[in-house]
Amino acid sequence: MAKIVSIVGARPQFIKLAPFSRALKLKEDVLHIIVHTGQHYDYNMAKLFFDELGIPSPDYHLGVGSGSHGEQTAEMLKGVEAVLTRESPGVVVVFGDTNSTIAGALAAAKLHIPVAHIEAGLRSYNRKMPEEINRVLADHCSDLLLCPTENAVNNLKIEGFRHVVNNGKLVRNTANVRHEGALVVNVGDIMYDSFLLALEIALEKSDFIERSGLVRGQYYLATVHRAENTDDTARLKAILQGLSRIGANKRVVFPVHPRTRKIIESIPEEYGAGIDLIDPVGYFDMIMLEKNACGILTDSGGIQKEAYFCGVPCITLRDETEWEETVDAGCNVLAGADADKILECSTAMERKIKTSEKFFGEGNTSAIAVELIRKVKN
Ligand code: UD1
Ligand code: UDP
């Protein structure tokens, strides 16, 4: 029986794990072990997603919690190493670009256990982002790099990965050869699977819009949690000012990440005027909030893509994005942390957008990933 260990810890990773664990459940010859690092721990940042999305309870919960990068990653490394030594799996799967991702990939690579990275190859080329460090290092520890887009594949080719599956054919990229064994494949975006799986249930089950007294198409949805925006008070104030100005004409609903909540509470209230600050919501309610918004303002990676899936214009509160294809398609615009620009972009984006291009695959990424991961040999 093949043993696969998945390592997760943060909200978007639970959402990515949902379709993956479901696809693995269909394989009788696979034992799937889930390790939760405990990076996120509030009910509405963690367990809520296991409950809502029917993800099996973690086999191991490391209870690491919050801390500085070094402290948190070190605790995770220790915990993951102990689990992997005990379980000795055939392959370890990591998702995205959080501290849980790099801890999982590094612990496994040092134990000579093959690593599969789901959402490989993304780059912002901004090394000040903790996520950029995590994703570059995780990719370079990985044996199977499962990319969500063609852009991601190209980023890896530039970094010297040469075994690339193109349209099912293994071709050699001869530039800067470094990675003898690692295999790069575009499998589509697993978050598209998550979204499609949840959309039907959300449409049926979630009455969040009605309960909140929101009018469909008459409000904006906002989220902010990136370190570059929350740890820089000037940027956060400018973003809140931009949202407040939008809020003077239309409701702005803002489910607040706990990291951001703590900082907003230390900023004068005038900056949050006209914004509906609410607690983080579950995935079904979030999808309904996204689908019915007239625009989405966010610095989240996942939410930029969900805006695209929903056909709702996105205003990204960052200076660069890993999801360039959505910008090129005219569905996403970079407003940075400039109050005037945020207001300007929201007005300019108030129109229907066309999202016919399938940049993110067909919604069958989990099934493709499972087949590839099962073939990984040490
Ligand atoms: C992490 C990821 C980020 C990802 C995000 C998803 C890293 C470096 N960053 O950022 O890439 O986009 O998750 O949401 O891994 N907190 C709570 N309760 C919780 C979780 C966090 O109160 O359940 C607060 C704590 O004060 C903590 C802070 O949020 O110090 C930051 O949490 P942390 O997990 O370190 O980073 P995120 O900002 O959540
Ligand atoms: N999300 C959610 N409830 C919220 C905010 C976000 O369910 O209150 C979901 C969102 O729909 C997306 C994922 O969380 O699927 C994105 O996570 P986050 O923005 O925390 O991280 P990122 O994608 O930037 O790493």
Image: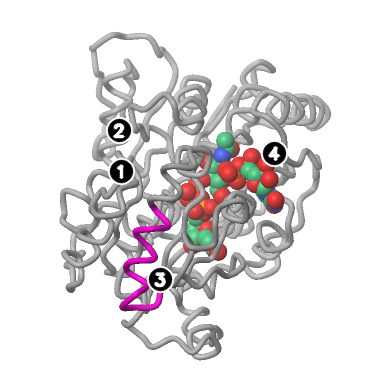
Image quadrant where residue 26 sits? bottom right
Q: Measuring from the top left, give residue 117's x and y in whole percent.
A: 50, 35
User: Disc 4 vs disc 2: which is toward the camera?
Assistant: 2
Q: How many marks?
A: 4
Q: Quadrant of the N terminus?
A: top right
Q: Which residue is mark 2?
A: 153
* 222 is higher (above) or lower (below) than 178: below
The amino acid type of the residue labelled 1 equals Thr
* Label 4: few (<14), some (14–19) or many (≥20) C-alpha neighbours in 10 Å: some
Whether label 1 touches label 3, CB < 8 Å = no
User: Disc 3 vs disc 2: which is toward the camera?
Assistant: 3
Give the Cα separation between the discs numbered 3 and 2. 28 Å
**Which circle marks residue 3 in the picture?**
4
- Give SS at disc 3: helix
Whether label 1 touches label 2, CB < 8 Å = yes
Residue under the point 69% across and 57% down:
46
Q: Which residue is mark 1?
A: 149
Q: Earlier in the sequence, mark 4 or mark 2?
A: 4
Give the Cα separation between the discs numbered 4 and 1. 28 Å
Q: Measuring from the top left, give residue 329's x and y in whole percent.
A: 16, 54
* Label 1: few (<14), some (14–19) or many (≥20) C-alpha neighbours in 10 Å: many
Q: Which residue is mark 3?
A: 290
Write down which quadrant ligand 1 falls in.
Answer: top right
Residue under the point 26% across and 61% down:
343
Residue under the point 25% across and 52% down:
359
Q: Which residues are magenta?
A: 239-252
Question: Main SS of the magenta segment?
Answer: helix
Q: Is mark 1 within 8 Å of ligand 2?
A: no
The amino acid type of the residue labelled 2 equals Val
